[in-house]
Each structure stands twice: as C-alpha cells, then as structure tokens.
Image: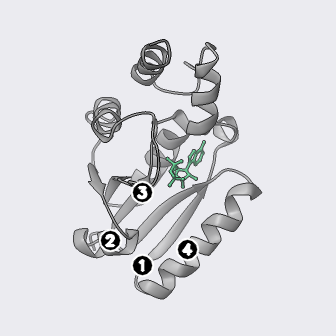
C-alpha cells in the first residue's frame, strides 16, 4: 500500500521543530508532501516563493518527500493528491484545542482522511515560527532554532 500524507502549514519560516516532525513522519509514510498553505487573509513575513525556497534547500536529497503549495481546504487538497493522512505537530496543551477542533471538522468533511498528531520532541517544544520572528526582530540570534539559510534570511529581512 502506498501511504501518502500531507504536512500542511504556513512554514513562515521553516524551523527545526518543523524539520523534526518532518523527519519522523517520513519514517511512517511512503510519501510526505509538505504543503505550504497560501492564505490571502494571513500576513506573512516571507513570500510563498521564499518559504518554498528554504524548504527545498534544507530538504535536498530527502527521500519520499515532495513540496507543494495549496489554497483552500486541506481535505480538498488531500483528495487532489491522493493523501489519506494529515500530519500535525503538537507542542503543548495550547496547540490542542485548536488542532482538535480542526481535526473534528476535517473528519466530518472527509471521513476517509485521518489526522495524525506527532508530539513535539522535548528540545523543540518551545520553538514556533512566531516566537523565532519576534526574537530575530529584536536582533537576537536564532540559529539554534532554525536552519542556517533561514537565520541568514531573517537577519537580512529584519535588518532592512
Ligand atoms: P499553521 O499556521 O498551520 O499552524 P505552522 O507552520 O505554524 O502552520 O505549523 C505547521 C505545523 O507544524 C503545525 O501542526 C504545528 O503545530 C507544527 N509545529 C510547528 N512548530 C512545531 C514544533 N516546534 N514542534 C512540533 N510541531 C510544530
């Protein structure tokens, strides 16, 4: 059986926490598609092309991985690409309520699609794109929390 999962998110920008979830999901599925959500209601620091560029660069050579962008409902995108699982990472209880509500709605919309939650690893549990951007905005080093290409891009963008 060819098990295809999508890992959807904003990835604005990619962090080491995202990468941890990605590595672990590649061990569970035949194919994982990182699906960058294009959401016109959400203001992002990095453009879709920049976010795609970081992920392509950092995941070069990883087997079983594809990168794509999508608009609209996640379950509709699953049907389009033949995915039967949606991967989400859970950091703390604060993630839980929101993720649970979305997973219930997705189950109603597409009963054949499972949401698979992976608990964040201890060392990444405090990392979020939002916090990383905030710290970088104040000139502090975030190179332990994000890949090198991302920390350079943060420095460049936020010092402009
Ligand atoms: P979204 O806007 O969809 O929440 P994000 O890029 O912030 O997009 O996150 C994408 C997914 O990765 C979400 O499931 C989120 O919970 C998960 N995630 C983000 N950071 C971490 C982390 N440090 N550890 C585990 N999961 C994480």
Question: Does the closest atom of ligand 1 sit within 8 Å of the Cβ of label 3?
Answer: yes
**Horizontal side of residue 78 vs 118, given as left or right:** left
Residue at image mark 3 = 8
Estimate the x, y position of residue 41 in percent, counting from the top left. Answer: 44, 55
118 w.r.t. 107: above or below? above
Residue at (57, 80) in percent of width and height: 104
Estimate the x, y position of residue 97 in percent, counting from the top left. Answer: 70, 67
Between the C-alphas of marks 4 and 1, the distance is 10 Å
Label 4, secondary structure: give it. helix
Viewer-side residue, 52 vs 5: 52
Between the C-alphas of marks 3 and 2, the distance is 10 Å
Q: Which of the 4 image quadrants contains residue 62?
A: top left
| Disc on res. 78 | 2
Estimate the x, y position of residue 70 in percent, counting from the top left. Answer: 30, 58
Estimate the x, y position of residue 139 in percent, counting from the top left. Answer: 61, 13
Number of numbered markers: 4
Circle 1 crowding by C-alpha within 10 Å: few under 14, some 14–19, many from 20: many
Between the C-alphas of marks 1 and 2, the distance is 8 Å
Q: Which of the 4 image quadrants contains residue 74?
A: bottom left
Residue at image mark 1 = 113
The mark that comes first in sequence, 4 or 1, is 4
């Amino acid at each position: 059986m060819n098990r295809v999962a999508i890992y959807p998110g904003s990835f604005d920008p990619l962090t080491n926490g995202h990468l941890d979830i990605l590595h672990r999901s590649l061990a569970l599925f035949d194919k994982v598609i990182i699906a960058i959500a294009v959401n016109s209601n959400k203001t992002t620091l990095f453009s879709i092309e920049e976010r795609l560029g970081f992920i392509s660069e950092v995941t070069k050579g990883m087997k079983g991985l594809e990168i794509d962008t999508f608009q609209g409902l996640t379950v509709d995108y699953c049907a389009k690409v033949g995915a039967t699982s949606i991967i989400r990472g859970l950091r703390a209880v604060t993630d839980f309520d929101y993720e649970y509500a979305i997973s219930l709605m997705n189950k109603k919309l597409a009963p054949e699609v499972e949401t698979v939650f992976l608990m964040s690893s201890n060392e990444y549990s405090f990392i979020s794109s939002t916090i990383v951007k905030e710290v970088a905005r104040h000139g502090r080093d975030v190179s332990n929390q994000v890949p090198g290409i991302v920390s350079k891009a943060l420095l460049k963008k936020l010092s402009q």
